[in-house]
Image: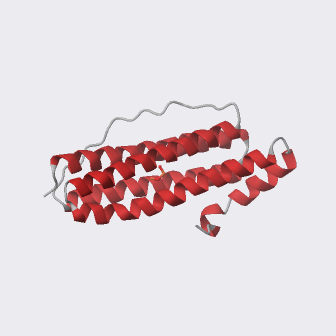
Amino acid sequence: MLSKKIQLGLVKQLNRELESSLLYLSMGSWVERKGYDGICEFLYDHSNEERMHMLKLIRYLNRRGGEVTLDKILIENITYPSLKELFLKLFEHEKKISDEINLLVEISLREKDFFTYNFLQWYVEEQTEEEAVSKMILDKIELIGEDKGGLYFFDKDMKNFHKNKKF
Ligand code: OFO
């Protein structure tokens, strides 16, 4: 049986994953319109990954007799002044998600819910990767700067990012 605090925390987190999925989706749509096919592929693929993160939480809650509620999440059609601004926002978003996962782990320990603690370790590992990936992309974009050729090749590389990922 899940405690009230764990139940609340898990539902909050699954809705954050849903929000992440929609955020990546809307970012993907923005870059697609700008003609960055590779980055668009990365963002759409990642939107699916975030949905999988949400589903994992839903299934865990159901397995443990919890209750799932989905929020109405509105992601405005976002526009960005530049690719750099977009990835800056993404990096900040992932850092916020990491803080929330850490808090959830802390609550699971305080509640002595070692099942949930154990379940959350997958998210701890995943967030290490998520932060590293968004930071790596941001660093590359900063390095490329205004170099249009560099951006063209970077966009090409991003096409197979999820297939070739080394993290
Ligand atoms: Fe679900 O990891 Fe990103 O937000």
Q: Position of residue 25 (x, y in %)?
A: 53, 44
**Along the viewing direction, whichever of 37 and 122 lies nearer the viewer:** 122
The quarter of the rendered structure image containing the N terminus is: bottom left
- Residue at point 60% right, 51% down? 134
Q: In the rendered view, would you say 153 is above or below 31?
A: below
**Along the viewing direction, whichever of 60 and 22 lies nearer the viewer:** 60
The quarter of the rendered structure image containing the C terminus is: bottom right
The image quadrant that residue 58 belongs to is bottom left
- Residue at point 39% right, 46% down? 100
Q: Is residue 93 left or right of residue 138?
A: left
Name the residue furthest left.
Answer: 1
Q: Is residue 88 left or right of residue 54?
A: right
Residue 41 in sight from this viewpoint? no
The image quadrant that residue 61 belongs to is bottom left
Name the residue furthest front.
Answer: 110
- Residue at point 38% right, 52% down? 102
